[in-house]
Each structure stands twice: as structure tokens, then as C-alpha cells.
Image (spheres, grey):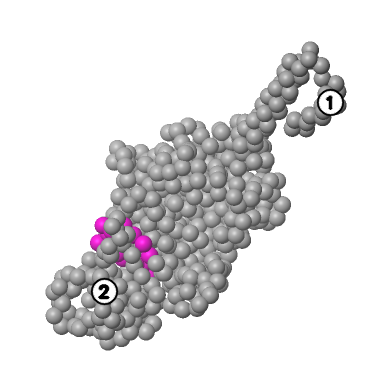
Amino acid sequence: MQGVLSVEGTLFLPCKISRRSKMRRKFVVVLSVFLTVLILSATLAGCGKPAKNAEYEEFEQVIKTVLENSVDRMGKDEKQIKASESVKAARQKVFAKGDDAPGLTAFAENEGDGLFDIIAEYSDAVQVMEENYVKGYFELVSQTTMSLPLIAGDALRTYPKVKNFYGVSVGCREEGIFLKAEKEGTSFIVKVYTGGGNFYEEYFVMKLNYNGATDFSFTVYDVAEENAQLNRGAYEMFYYGDSELNFLNFIRGESNTAVYYQNGTDYYLDSADAVEKLYAIVKDEFASIDFAAIKELGTAPDFTINGEQWAECYIKYINGGEHFGAQDGQFDIKNGVLYGWTGKDEDCPSSVTLPSVRSIYYELRFPEHVKELVIPATVQSVKVEKGELERLEGEKLPSQDKTLVECPLKYFTLNLNSENGDYRFLDTISVSGGSALFHTQNNCLYSSQDGMLLYVAGAQSRTSLDLNGEVSQGALLCFEWGSFSALRVCPLPTEVYTRRG
């Protein structure tokens, strides 16, 4: 008897099979199949197993430790820290001169007092804010210069299986993120360029000096050019944080404001003069940023990760993935636009003052227990995706265009998310300063442009209401689902009766 057998690429030539060779033949076939399956299993296992990357593992541990012992601790055990000791430690570690300066380059002799000394000069002008106010500003730090390198490094070791991390540039074109991390002694430097994909053009540089879990400091430099599409002017933003729980953020060019956190208290300072003095201390660092070199990361990165691979690694680090616990609550800010609150609802205070952003999303969302909302005068526009605006305007075939565009105020809504899906409404709403976009009267929010009623707060206690102009979709929701049991003077808009049937 003759035959030809082929098992997974192993060819057995025609031969005469005798009775004596049957057992041997069976053994050869079984062995061949076993070896083939073994090889395939090893190959498939190797495809999903990350490469050993000691540099990345070191960086990952350092960043996790820094976040756990700085931003994540804000609002928790900070009462144990004395302000005088914190400020002294911050000055010694970050604002030293000469070659011993760990976090920043040396400062000029006449600029040696430090950032917190300047802040102290304006102590009479600051506002004490609610808990976690400053923490929301540092979301940008945790989600860009800290979390993005973790995602990129994990993708590097998992897909191209790169075994080194420092000095290796990596990007994801679908996301529009490109970066490189470097190490110099006990200092780590991260450079990030965003542009295209889901991000607008922006530059980030982080310098982290790390001597241990209780001895570190970091600075972040964020630079953005003018963006007409976002209705955003050019700005330079600076962040500072350390293991003693001192945090400072200021923005120069748009709002000229500063926020800082010391001794367990959140502060807000609206002073262009103070910001200019703060900027004078760090201006040389901003001037030393090589924007062309950072932008080059987006042109020719050493390795490119596709969108699907990036997404797989993203979920490991954001919002309770396997590497970090559930995300603490904070303001949800993307590309300079405030979307509301993200993370743990219980971290959100009942009285909320929005950060000094320039734009807010057309559906602003907060947890249901929020009772009071203050909108700063810095808010100059409401944004919505172009395709979503087409849907709101009634187009039959709206596009999927995600470009943010100006949203008519008649579509602006404030949503308080409840567990059972019921509508909840604020007790109080107000606008701080002279806003060109909004104004409030009798606990109602109006458009400063045409007087349209946008939101009605305090429905249950309201006994009267003047309706002299147009009513927005958001205000109609207040009338439709709010309890106006005490209202005696004003008839509800006709649209409400039409909706209720």
C-alpha cells in the first residue's frame, strides 16, 4: 500500500508500508502533529506577550509612584502637612540655583525668590475655592505627559516588541499623539507633540526630578498656537507639583490666571500682573523649548502604533484599567474645552465653580448632587461637533465630522446625571465677572447676546418668572421636568404643554 501524507507542511513521500512499519508510521505522524501544534502555540503566545523592557518598567513605576503620592493625594491627607515646611521644601528642591538645580535650569540672580514667594505677595487678592478645584487642572498633566508615555511604552513592548524605552520616539497617527521620554541621572524628560487625529496642535515638555517616593518635583510646559477653529488664542501654560503637595498652575496669554494648592486648600488668583511675575521666573525654560525638534516627532517617529493597538493599551491606564485604580473625580477638559465632570462622582463638590476655560461643551454634565454652579467670565464660547450640530439643526443625513465648531446657545444644556435617569436641576446658578456670553438674573441663565433664557435654577422655591424673550431647548427641559409647584405668576411656555401632551 502506498500513499502521500502531509501534516501542517510536513511531507511524507510515497512509500510501501509494511506491517512492521505501521506502529512506527503512526508514531511519526503523531509526533509530527504534536511538534506542529507545540510550535504554533508558542508562536501565538509570543505574539501577545510583551517584550521585556526594563527601561519602560522603571519609568512606569516612577510615574505611578509620583501620581499616587502627589495628584492622587490632593484633598486627602494634606492636613498633616505644614505650609511653612512645604514651601521651604519646594524652594529648596525646585528653585535652587546653579548646577544643583534639579527640576529647572538655573535662574537669574534677581529671580531667585521663587514662584511661591510671588504668590505670597498676592495673598490678599486670592479666592479660596472648593475642594478638588485645583486637582481638575492637573488632569492635563496626568492624561498627557504622564499617562501618554505609559500607553506608548506598553504599546512599544507589546507590538514591535521594543526592548528599550528612553530616547525612542513613538506615535499614533489615528490619535495624533507623538512623544519621546528621556532619562538624565535622576531626572526624566518627556516631550509630547499632538496634532491631527483627536488632538489639535500643542506642545508639552515635562521635567521630573525623582529621588524617591517622598522626594520628587515636576514641572510641565504647555504651549499652544492660536487656533481659530477652537476660537482659542495662543497661550503658554505652566504646571508645578511636588511630593510635599504644593501645586501651581498658571496660564499666560488667554486668561492670565493662576490656581494653586497649599496646605490642603485650593486657591484662585486672577491677576495679569502676578502671572507676568511668575512667568519671568520660568521664561528661560519656555524659550529653551525646541519646538521644531518636538514637532519632528510627528513627522518621523521611530515606531508607529496603529489606532487599535493604542486603544488596547489605553484601557490599561485610563479609568480603572489594570495598572491604575479607578480615576479620581476631576473636571473633564479636552483640548481646552470643558465637558463637565469625570471619574468618581463623590469627589465632585455640591458647589462647583468651573475652571477658567475659554470654551465649554454644549452638553455640560455633572453628578446629580451638585446644587450650585458658577460660570467664570473666561468662558467665551460653547462648542459642539460639526456632525452633531447638523443633527441638532435637523439635517436628514448628518455627517460624522468630529471637528469642534461654535454651537448656538439655544442648544446649550446643563445635565445632572442621576442613577435612575431622572432629570435633576440646580438650586443656584451664577456668572462671575463680566461675561460677554452669559448673564444671570433672578437665578436664571440668559444669553448676553440676545437675552434668550437658557436655564432656570431653583424651580421648587420659585414663585415668579419673567419670560420676555426666546426660550432655549435647555430651558424647556427645566420647565418640562422641573417642579414649579410654588410658581404663581408666570404661565409656562406653550412648548412645555405641547411636549407634555
**Occupied quadrant, residue 101:** top right
Examine the rendering and report whether any part of residue 163 can be seen.
yes
**Occupied quadrant, residue 242:** top left
- Gap in Å between the C-alphas at discs 2 and 1? 85 Å
Question: As shown in the figure, which amino acid type bears the numbered disc 2?
Answer: Glu
In the picture, which quadrant includes the C terminus?
bottom left
Q: Does 437 sit above or below residue 117? A: below
Helix, strand or loop under label 2: helix
Residue 367 magenta-drawn?
yes
Residue span colored magenta: 364-377
Question: x%, y% of residue 315?
Answer: 50, 46
Q: Nearer the viewer, mark 2 or mark 1?
A: 1
- Specify few, some or many for label 1: CA neighbours under 10 Å numbering under 14, 14-19, or 20 or more: few
Question: As shown in the figure, which amino acid type bears the numbered disc 1?
Answer: Gln
Q: Which residue is mark 2?
A: 480
Q: Does 325 sit above or below residue 467? A: above
Which residue is at the far top? 20
Q: Which residue is mark 1?
A: 2
Decide if residue 57 is on the left or right side of residue 429: right
Question: x%, y% of residue 491?
Answer: 20, 83
102, 397: nearer the viewer: 397
In the picture, which quadrant includes the N terminus?
top right
Residue 315 magenta-drawn?
no
Question: x%, y% of residue 250?
Answer: 45, 57
